[in-house]
Amino acid sequence: PRKLGHECNQLVVGPNPTRRAIEKEANFRFSKKAGFSFLIAPKLKACAIINIMPTSTYITLNSGAKMPVIGLGTWKSPPHEVGKAVEYAITECGYRQIDCAAVYENEKEIGCAFKNIFVKKFAQRDKIFVTSKLWNNMHRPDKVRKACLQTLSDLQIDFLDLYLIHWGVAKGMVRLDKIPIHETLEALEELVQ
């Protein structure tokens, strides 16, 4: 648990099939109030361990796709640990959304985890919502497809459920490219099948 303020610890527990075992082991209980789950854990000396659990588990996007509201972010995940974290989140904790980005420089490791998960049938690819993002130096329309294909290759998957523009500006490593955002959006739309 991480310290939260001066009085509380925070424990992150995702949707987990072994919730009762965790409750028993950590000596805490879940209680629902106003759409959130609060964990009270006297054994951990925490006055309020909070796990936000929305009443709905999915948001329906304009495309009709259902996006899980809780997902695992992979930003700043340590090398040689992110793959294990993704596997654990999907196979042990029930996560169904993984958030990636090329700029995080860990998509190849995540791809190895995905391959293991899908080959061993721990989960089906169409049941895992995968998001990635187009980095700032790839906003030119002629670079968008190349960037997306590289992400797909690194993640070892055939499709992304959501591909976002990471930031709303096209900033290269040194210079700022003056690319109208609508040109990048049009190139992204061409990727949709």
Image (cartoon, rainbow, N blue to C red):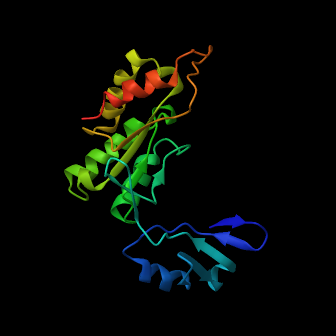
Q: Position of residue 64 (x, y in %)?
A: 31, 52
Q: Where is residue 34 in the image (x, y as percent from the top left)?
A: 57, 78
| Of the pair 40 and 144, the residue shown nearer to us | 144
- In the shown orientation, is residue 70 left or right of residue 125? right
Q: Which residue lies furthest to the right in this view?
A: 6
Residue at 43% across / 28% down in the picture?
Answer: 185
Q: Where is residue 13 in the image (x, y as percent from the top left)?
A: 50, 69
- In the shown orientation, is residue 130 left or right of residue 27? left
Residue 96 in the image: above or below residue 22: above
- In the shown orientation, is residue 115 left or right of residue 69? left
Residue 141 in the image: above or below residue 64: above
The quarter in which the N terminus is drawn is bottom right
In this orientation, does residue 147 appear? no
Task: Count all numbered tags in the image, as a single digit.
Answer: 0
Q: Position of residue 103 (x, y in %)?
A: 50, 32
| Of the pair 187 and 117, the residue shown nearer to us | 187
Residue at 32% across / 47% down in the picture?
Answer: 63
Q: Quadrant of residue 158?
A: top left
In this orientation, does residue 140 appear? yes
The quarter in which the C terminus is drawn is top left
